Image: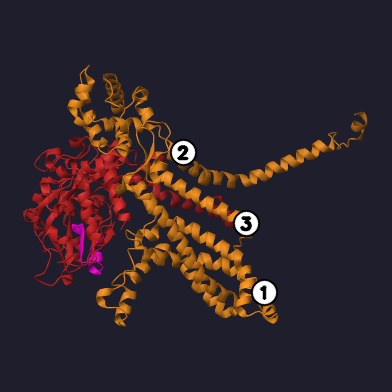
Amino acid sequence: MNANAQNKIYTTDGIPLEISLKKVERRNKIKAFLLAAPLLIFLLVIYIFPILNLLTRSVDNRLLSELLPRTYIALQDWDGSELPSEEIYKTFFIDLDIAHKAKVSGKVSTRLNYTKNGYKSLLNKTRRSLKNFEDGNYKEQFIKLHKKWADLEYWQAMKQSMPKFSVDKYLNSFDLETSFDGKIVQKPEDRRVHRILWLRTLYVALGVTICCLFLAYPISHLLATLPLRYSNLLMICVLLPFWTSLLVRTSSWMILLQSQGVINDVLVYFNFIGDKNRLELMYNMNGTFIAMTQILLPFMVLPLYSVMKNISPSLMRAGSSLGGTPFVSFRKIYFPLTLPGIGAGSLLVFILAIGYYITPALVGGASGILISNKIAYHMKETLDWAMASAMGSILLVSVLLIYWVYNKIVGIDNIKLG
Amino acid sequence: MKMLLKPIKLINLNNKLEENMKKMLQTVLISILFIPFAALAEVNVVSWGGAYTESQKLGYGDPYQELSGVKINWIDYSGGLSEVRTQVESGKVTWNIIDLYAKDTIIGCDEGLLVEFDFDNDFPPAPDGTPASEDFFTDMPSPCAVGNILYSWNYAYHLDAHPEGLRPSTIADFYDTDKFPGKRSIYTSAMSNIEIALVADGVKASAVYTVLENQTGAVDRAINKVKALCEDENGGCVFWSAGAQPPELLASGEVVMATGWNGRFFNAIVNEGTPLQMVWDGQVLDYEYFSLIADSPNQDEAMAALAYFTGTEGLAGSAKYIAYAPWRISSLDIITAGEPWYKDGVTEMMPQMPTSPANTKNYILMSGEYWADNQTEVGEKWEAMKAGL
């Protein structure tokens, strides 16, 4: 101990050097952190917070338990086998009256209408008559007001909409629902829409990625091997559409693809097809495929190009001199070397394609729309943002999953973006 | 400010003249920066764009701007309340007035996104003194709505697509692909489509909503009718979402018939000379409303503008530019007295209106309440049908 203290080195102002150094280091750390702080705060506000908000919105179902607190408690013990007791009707009346006076009963009706259609007009009619209610016999008065108040299904729907947190929106995203006794069941067949769209989205994203790969590979190879003056021109051809607005490109495809459009007109003019048998290139999956492939092509070309540019031509020559046919040298030398580019390009295109919205909305018609269009539908049409959030979260998780699988199989370090 | 002035500082730091100039420049810059804020109030009005917004702008937007000095900005949207809800929830409301479907005025009012009117106080009476609430054709669907126009969802066809003597004339013809082969264009959502499909399937137009509410399977019946049309070898569907699309799809020959808003067809026929023909049978007569968004800036100016827009003269004004009927009974007198009322000075407007006797022989009256109630369930079925096409 003593020897140790004696060996300590001190700075001129008498503080042990060790502490002094630590102090400086800490100060530097704080400085560095402060420099990075704007970025961190920016990320937090613009990126992390909205995502957390999205996730909470999808399961947050506190609205009814907050606006109808007494009914929420009263319905806990109700088993749903027969109409609620007079007591519950009375509690509901009190809650609804308070909500109505606070001008929030509209929110209640919107929420309940998601679970059971018809609630909106039922509650609107009911709250208009609230002032005419007399004390006592609430059950009778409710039922006299509207026969739906004697319908068990409406009360069951209310109880089902009450839990503070619910995963119903996630189930709904896969066309499932919870029955009143708590079992997870399939939705009626004529209301299943999401599963088909998830599968279609995967199919289109995968298809577009493969199409892009097959188109981009030769282009990138040309770009990387042609003399500079030609390759520059080619590069501009790739980049020009990349810099053009997405909407402009999609609308141009509409002009080309429609049944009275340029492509069909040319085909008819040269008698490849009859005037009556014009190809249906748009307002279906074809349109989505063609337009998305063209729009996402640069995202495949650029990573591939940057990888191919760095492959020395002497490697292929070496392969030939060792007796390999062009195909063998390609398969054994060139192709494996381009793998990082393929990985990067495919991942980029796939992730972009899986959330594509505007192009399928414009050229996809009914059979070419994707899951993102459905999310927009819930944002805009039904105003069921919890549903949109749930679907958005699923999309987010699936992209992260793909990233994770890719990392496990190929390794994210092998990606090369340039 | 400092950043902007830095270069000047660097040129000559010590010169007093420069210093003075700096000050002058500073004043100029400040005044330039603040001019937009110092100018008169602005009111942002959101509507459906195209020929419709044009008629609103020319009919009452511009006249009011001249009259009051309040700047009216027109913003396009494609329906729905999502933007309104985003603005109200985040507390950064930039829109003032919005043009809405009946169902959205109900939903928006319930959600507290819109301002409830004190109808007869907020809106001026007719010139003869009739209070506003009695000057409008019917009651409003919600306390947050004030009537704007009556329009209709009917179908039209291109004259070249069907030879003379073989032209569609009834709503059943729209679904008859044997007689009239070719693709049809219909609205992207279920609203209007299932009503029209039921009438084409033989339900009486006046009984559509009674059937929808009370007969089990009525919705499925309508949706299956549309599905059959879309899957038909001789048929097929293109779904439209913006009002300008149906005339365009007809003009380009992409489809042979299309449902759409009568004013847009009128505009294509009269203004652009496209040879289209509208069919007035089994159409949906619908109302369009204005609402005031809650907690918007310049609320008083917006309310004053809205009162002018929906006044007798205002509503008659927009009918000068598009074939939509004004909501106020008293506006009709102005139009009748001023015929030919259309801006070209030759077209009589009254016969073009969706409310004229010749056009209302067989029509469905839209129920906003039905859609506010049922859009989730019917919408799900409709979307499921579309996804399976």
Residue A60: x %, y % from top left: 43, 36
Crowding near the residue tagged with mark 1, few <14, some 14–19, many ≥20 C-alpha atoms within 10 Å: few
Q: Nearer the viewer, mark 2 or mark 3?
A: 3
Which color was chain B given?
red
Q: How many marks?
A: 3
Kind of residue sitting beneath label 3: Gly
Which color was chain A given?
orange
Distance from the alpha carbon under mark 1 to that under mark 3: 24 Å
Q: Residue at label 3?
A: A411
The reply to whether label 2 and label 3 mark residues of one chain is yes
**SS under mark 2:** helix
The image quadrant that residue A187 belongs to is top left
Residue A278: x %, y % from top left: 29, 73
Residue A54: x %, y % from top left: 46, 43
The reply to whether label 1 and label 2 mark residues of one chain is yes
Kind of residue sitting beneath label 2: Thr
Q: Considering depth in this image, is B12 or B208 the residue closer to the camera?
A: B208
Q: Which residues are magenta?
A: B244-263
Kind of residue sitting beneath label 1: Ser
**SS under mark 1:** loop
Residue depicted at 41% across the width and 53% down the height: A198
Q: Residue at label 2?
A: A56
Is B256 in the magenta? yes
Crowding near the residue tagged with mark 2, few <14, some 14–19, many ≥20 C-alpha atoms within 10 Å: some
Distance from the alpha carbon under mark 2 to that under mark 3: 32 Å
Protein chain holding label 3: A
